[in-house]
């Protein structure tokens, strides 16, 4: 049973929901959790999980849930996952902390994409679900918000570093999110009357003393100026020690960081940079696009005019060509599983190779002596073979690999020197990409 995975493709902003409630560990597990799943099934509007996973995956059903909890039970905890096989993607976990620990129901949820919550009615259902949970399982604090925005706030832990969170718990309101449930302790810290008078779309006192606060009707437009004003007003009201203008300025800066930037990459490496951007965390992506728009790949220096090429200095040129072919095959053997196009020896396969090495952080994650002894010669030979095969190039063999050239048009290129520079660092993989050299050679072929 295949579920939609969060990590298979391009990272996108998503809903993040965190809920920690108190439950009665003495009650029968099924009875105590029945209200939780009832609220989920009633209000998961268009995103109801259809898979429950303990030690194995099963179709969502109460029996599957109880089985999963049983399978994952340890001495003082148990947990299981809930997922979807259809869009939108869901990654949800429910954990129970059991005595001798403080009994706790811990829910963590991500739903992708965030744009799924652009409709007010769908957002209302989400709020009603959390309201039902918080009314039945009292919380110290619960939130639902944009994952990207929480990351830009400085921490996914709702505006606090891990040390502060561990030391202080939720001792004060560090961040106001789109949806918030404040437990009685936080309510008392702020003042119940003051909290209930917070300027927000919805403020409601729950029967157990918690307070539900929603800043505006919809979540997906959290970065709009209207949403930021609502967020800043609520936060400044709840924290009289904070300045409204300072809060608003910080929120607007976060919105500016997330605002879409049109890619204007150098055409030689645009396909490579597009893939680099897709692998960048979504909360950093627009900033990365802007950086790569401004960046220009250096002009390749690994060439000479054909008129000043180094002459062959090997006794057996045919044998030298066999060596280059064998070295190139070493790269194919290394990469063929991860980069199937490497068999083709095309310009597109060079881009695939560039991206693979960048994605793997190859110059930092492998031993330098192995890179220099094995990877660099294989990469240089492969680049040379692509120049020969696709641009009508011709090898000019030399005893030293660094002096070996490929003649293309009125220039000779030094693929092994390029490979050596290429493998210096992860940034060098972009600065000295194989794709860039090929495209420049292609333009100078005639």
Image: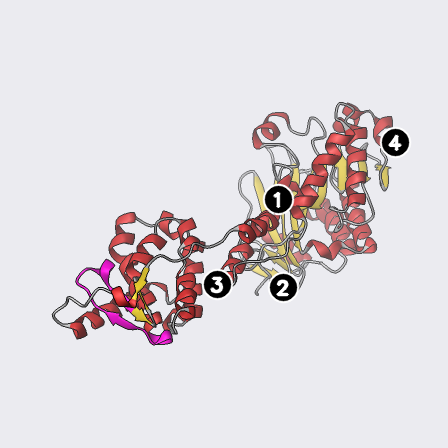
> Foreground mark, 2 or 3?
3
Q: CA distance from mark 4 to mark 2?
A: 42 Å
Q: Which residue is mark 1?
A: 95
Of marks 4 and 2, which one's residue comes earlier in the chain? 2
Picture residue at 80% right of the left edge, 50% below the top: 218
Q: Is residue 411 left or right of residue 25?
A: left
In magenta, the rendered stretch is 389-406
> Foreground mark, 1 or 3?
3
Q: CA distance from mark 1 to mark 3?
A: 49 Å
Residues packed near mark 4 inside 10 Å, few (<14), some (14 to 19) or many (20 plus): few
Q: CA distance from mark 2 to mark 3?
A: 38 Å
Task: Kindly indicate the quadrant of the structure image that contains residue 227.
Answer: top right
Q: Position of residue 97 (x, y in %)?
A: 61, 38
Of marks 1 and 2, which one's residue comes earlier in the chain? 2
Picture residue at 44% right of the left edge, 69% below the top: 348
> Foreground mark, 1 or 2?
2
Of marks 4 and 3, which one's residue comes earlier in the chain? 4
Q: Which residue is mark 3?
A: 268
């Amino acid at each position: 049973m295949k579920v939609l995975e969060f990590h298979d493709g391009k990272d996108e902003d998503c809903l993040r929901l965190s809920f920690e409630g108190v439950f009665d560990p003495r009650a029968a597990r099924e009875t105590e959790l029945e209200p939780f799943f009832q609220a989920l099934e009633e209000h998961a509007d268009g995103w109801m999980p259809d898979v429950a996973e303990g030690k194995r995956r099963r179709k969502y059903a109460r029996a599957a849930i109880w089985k999963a909890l049983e399978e994952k039970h340890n001495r003082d905890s148990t947990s299981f996952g809930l997922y979807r096989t259809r869009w939108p993607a869901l990654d949800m976990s429910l954990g129970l902390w059991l005595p001798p620990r403080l009994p706790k129901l811990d829910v963590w949820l991500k739903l992708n994409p965030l744009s799924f919550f652009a409709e007010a009615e769908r957002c209302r259902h989400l709020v009603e679900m959390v309201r039902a949970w918080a009314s039945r399982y009292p919380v110290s604090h619960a939130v639902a918000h944009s994952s990207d925005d929480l990351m830009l706030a400085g921490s996914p832990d709702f505006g606090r570093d891990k040390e502060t969170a561990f030391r202080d718990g939720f001792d004060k309101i560090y961040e106001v999110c789109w949806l918030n449930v404040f437990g009685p302790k936080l309510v008392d810290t702020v003042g119940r009357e003051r909290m209930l008078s917070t300027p927000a779309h919805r403020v409601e006192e729950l029967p157990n003393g918690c307070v539900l606060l929603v800043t505006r009707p919809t979540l997906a437009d959290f970065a709009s100026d209207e949403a930021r004003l609502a967020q800043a007003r609520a936060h400044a009201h709840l924290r009289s020690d904070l300045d409204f203008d300072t809060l608003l300025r910080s929120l607007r800066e976060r919105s500016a960081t997330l605002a879409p930037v049109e890619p204007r990459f150098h055409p030689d490496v645009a396909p490579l940079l597009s893939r680099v951007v897709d692998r960048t965390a979504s909360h950093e992506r627009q900033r990365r696009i802007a950086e790569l728009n401004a960046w220009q790949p250096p002009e390749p220096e690994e060439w000479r005019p054909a008129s000043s090429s180094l002459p062959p200095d090997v006794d057996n040129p045919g044998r030298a060509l066999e060596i280059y072919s064998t070295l190139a095959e070493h790269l194919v053997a290394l990469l063929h599983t991860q980069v199937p196009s490497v068999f083709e020896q095309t310009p597109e396969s060079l881009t695939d190779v560039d991206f693979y090495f960048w994605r793997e952080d190859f110059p930092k994650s492998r031993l330098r002596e192995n890179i220099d002894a094995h990877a660099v010669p294989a990469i240089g030979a492969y680049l040379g073979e692509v120049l020969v095969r696709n641009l009508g190039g011709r090898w000019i063999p030399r005893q030293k690999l660094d002096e070996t050239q490929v003649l293309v048009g009125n220039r000779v290129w030094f693929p092994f020197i390029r490979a050596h520079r290429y493998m210096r660092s992860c940034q060098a993989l972009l600065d000295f990409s194989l794709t860039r050299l090929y495209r420049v050679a292609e333009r100078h072929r005639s």
